Image (tube, grey):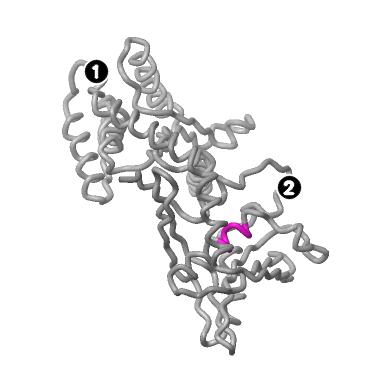
């Protein structure tokens, strides 16, 4: 039975077509609100037969792997003759007046082509059009590029994309198994629980297991950091959680979390398994020397199926929102 690899269309293509560039024009430099407005402005002009934000999914086999991909295409357009166009809308800070099709991003075409394949596979359509619609966020200028695509061509394209991702997927699956085996053998890193620690840890685990939120208040010295991190890590090993983000508002709290990270390192030195990898981020103010700001120490068990690029981006967004909230 093949191993299942579940991920979004965007996550798939951003990994496969990841490349380095100093040009930030087609990256997420505009706010989410600006991007949403640009999409809605285009979508309001769709016809009565057209559909927007259409959920699509497909399974694509690749040797010992089975890729289950999904996502929402921005527009599924139907012309008077019944022809179908997949519309992928992208907002950008870049000037697009003199833009040509060769200037468009391979990531954007990949995303649109995969949506086209998924729709064709689902509907039985053998030929359709694939469109990229670019919107300049300041001037609201629009630029469109279209390509005709046959189903067999789209199928080969989709298979090529997942084949390019497959080595990374296999590595992630191996790492995930090592991580889960490691967590299964992970014991509480101190000789005994302090008063109140076991209750807090049990509450954290139960909240994760039931998929609900937990707000807890406890006095200084009870050991809140390890009482929340330990059950969360155990939940990851049992497949109840993907990544763990630990946000702190004070340097002392961040230091406590880092001490527990040091315990993890010492465990590895003495032959005990390590539970995962850790990434630490600090607020911009601290890095620039302007003040302490929000300190974001974020344990990221990156071996959980998401690309490191996505994990870092999500972590940065959480730190940015926390910083904005406390500004």
Identity of the residue furthest to the right in this view? 98
Residue at image x 48%, y 45%? 318
The kind of secondary structure element at disc 2 is loop
Furthest residue toward bottom: 80
**What kind of element bears circle 1?**
loop
In the picture of the structure, the residue carrying the numbered disc 1 is 190
Q: Sequence-wise, which precedes: disc 2 or disc 1?
A: 2
Residue drawn where x is 46% and y is 71% of the image: 54
Can residue 101 be seen at all in this image of the molecule? yes
Q: Which residue is mark 2?
A: 23
Tell me the magenta residue range.
108-113
Q: Main SS of the magenta segment? A: helix
Can residue 110 be found in the magenta stretch?
Answer: yes
CB within 8 Å, label 2 to label 1: no
Q: Position of residue 269 (x, y in %)?
A: 37, 11
Q: Position of residue 298 (x, y in %)?
A: 44, 34
User: In the visual, does 75 lie left or right of 223?
Assistant: right
Q: Position of residue 67 (x, y in %)?
A: 42, 51
Mark in the foreground, 2 or 1: 2
């Amino acid at each position: 039975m093949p191993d299942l690899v579940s991920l979004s269309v965007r996550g798939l293509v951003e990994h496969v077509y990841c490349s380095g560039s100093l040009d930030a024009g087609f990256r997420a430099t505009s706010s989410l609100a600006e991007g949403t407005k640009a999409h809605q402005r285009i979508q309001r002009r769709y016809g009565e037969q057209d559909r927007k934000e259409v959920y699509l999914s497909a399974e694509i086999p690749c040797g010992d792997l089975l890729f289950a991909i999904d996502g929402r295409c921005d527009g599924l357009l139907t012309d008077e003759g019944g022809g179908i166009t997949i519309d992928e809308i992208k907002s950008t800070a870049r000037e697009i007046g003199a833009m040509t099709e060769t200037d468009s991003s391979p990531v954007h075409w990949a995303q649109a082509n995969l949506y086209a394949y998924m729709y064709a596979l689902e509907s039985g359509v053998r030929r359709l059009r694939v469109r990229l619609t670019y919107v300049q966020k300041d001037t609201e200028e629009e630029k469109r590029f279209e390509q005709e695509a046959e189903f067999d061509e789209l199928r080969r394209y989709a298979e090529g994309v997942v084949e390019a991702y497959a080595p990374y997927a296999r590595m992630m699956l191996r790492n995930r198994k090592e991580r889960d085996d490691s967590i299964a053998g992970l014991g509480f890193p101190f000789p005994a629980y302090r008063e109140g620690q076991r209750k807090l840890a049990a509450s954290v685990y139960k909240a994760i297991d039931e998929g609900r939120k937990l707000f807890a208040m406890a006095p200084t010295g009870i050991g809140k950091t390890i009482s929340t991190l330990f059950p969360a890590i155990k939940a990851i090993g049992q497949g109840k959680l993907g990544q763990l983000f630990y946000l702190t508002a004070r340097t002392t709290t961040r230091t406590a979390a880092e001490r527990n990270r040091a315990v993890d390192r010492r465990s590895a030195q003495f032959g005990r398994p390590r539970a995962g990898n850790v990434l630490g981020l600090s607020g911009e103010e601290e890095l620039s020397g302007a003040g302490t700001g929000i300190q974001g120490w974020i344990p990221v068990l990156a071996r959980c199926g998401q690309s490191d690029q996505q994990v870092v981006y999500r972590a940065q967004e959480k730190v940015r929102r926390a910083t904005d909230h406390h500004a």
